[in-house]
Image (tube, rainbow, N blue to C red):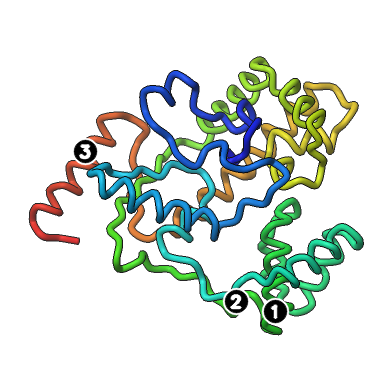
Amino acid sequence: MQAYRGMNIGTAKPSPDLLARLPHHLIDIKDPREQYTAGEFVSRADTLRAALGARGILPIICGGTGFYLKNFICGLPSAPPSSPEIRAEVAADLTRLGAPALREELAAADPGSASRIHEHDTYRLTRAVEILRASGAAPSSFAPKKEARAERRFVVLGIARERELLRGRIRARVDAMLAAGLEAEVRGLIARGCKRDDPGMQAIGYREFFELEGRPIAEIADAIALHTGQYAKRQMTFFRALPGIAWIEPTPEALIEALSRVERASSSGER
């Protein structure tokens, strides 16, 4: 979601000071009304990796969205490519019939895929229906890849935190975002034409202002904290499936030790 322009507070984008000291890429590249797909992310990230590598720079991917990370590490699944005609047809049905109708269509052919897609994840829902209509086959039959791309070498590190500590940090982050002006940021996006169904507005921290419009800000804050905690749980499920992931404590010493182990393994010829 940091790819979307104008969504700074709710996505916890790096501060201008940090951006000045440490270059970041793929931030502020999309309008909140545009869809940002995993395929586009992988394409852009691959291009950047090659450009940075040619300059002797080690690219670090930080996130976030486990679905996108897995596609970058393992490569995109072999599902049929997106058809502009079918995509437009599905988008029109989403507007005309609503997401529940598309979910019913998917569930009739592929109940497993339908059950795994979160109710607010309209991108994955519409993409699954696109695949179904384009191929006539269940989207789950196009299994995602599970092994890292052979032509790349990845060092995959996950940050481990105790659940109670994580819950407290989530609540503190929500309070800090509201204090920094999250409500005004959302109102500004709406004033610029963003609507409830726009891709960017599906993000946690933004959609709650639509779902609970007119309710006290404390109630909205509670909903953001709840949804963030639920998302964090889903993130962990995705992260555990990343090939070769090593879990470390959130300290500089743990990071240095992990990278030292990688360097020693490289020196000894291990992959």
> Where, by quadrant of the figure, is residue 266 drawn?
bottom left
Q: Quadrant of the C terminus?
A: bottom left
Number of residues whose C-alpha sits closer than 10 Å to that of mark 1, classed few (under 14), some (14–19) or many (20 or more): some
Number of residues whose C-alpha sits closer than 10 Å to that of mark 2, classed few (under 14), some (14–19) or many (20 or more): few
> Where, by quadrant of the figure, is residue 67 drawn?
bottom right
Task: Name the foreground residue: 205 vs 49.
Answer: 49
> CA gap, disc 1 to disc 2?
7 Å
Residue 38 placement, left or right of 55: right
68 lies above or below 63: below
**Amino acid type for the residue under numbered disc 1:** Ala
Residue that carries the numbered disc 3 in the rendered image: 257
**Amino acid type for the residue under numbered disc 2:** Pro
> Where, by quadrant of the figure, is residue 28 drawn?
top right
Labels 3 and 2: the sequence-earlier one: 2
**Amino acid type for the residue under numbered disc 3:** Glu
Q: Which mark is residue 169?
A: none
172 lies above or below 271: above
Residue 202 placement, left or right of 214: left
Q: Quadrant of the N terminus?
A: top right
Task: Name the foreground residue: 191 vs 227.
Answer: 191
237 lies above or below 142: above
Q: Please report the residue visible at 75 percent of the width from the left and 71 percent of the height from the top.
A: 85
Q: Which mark is residue 134?
A: 1
Q: Position of residue 22 (x, y in %)?
A: 37, 28
Q: Residue furthest left?
A: 268
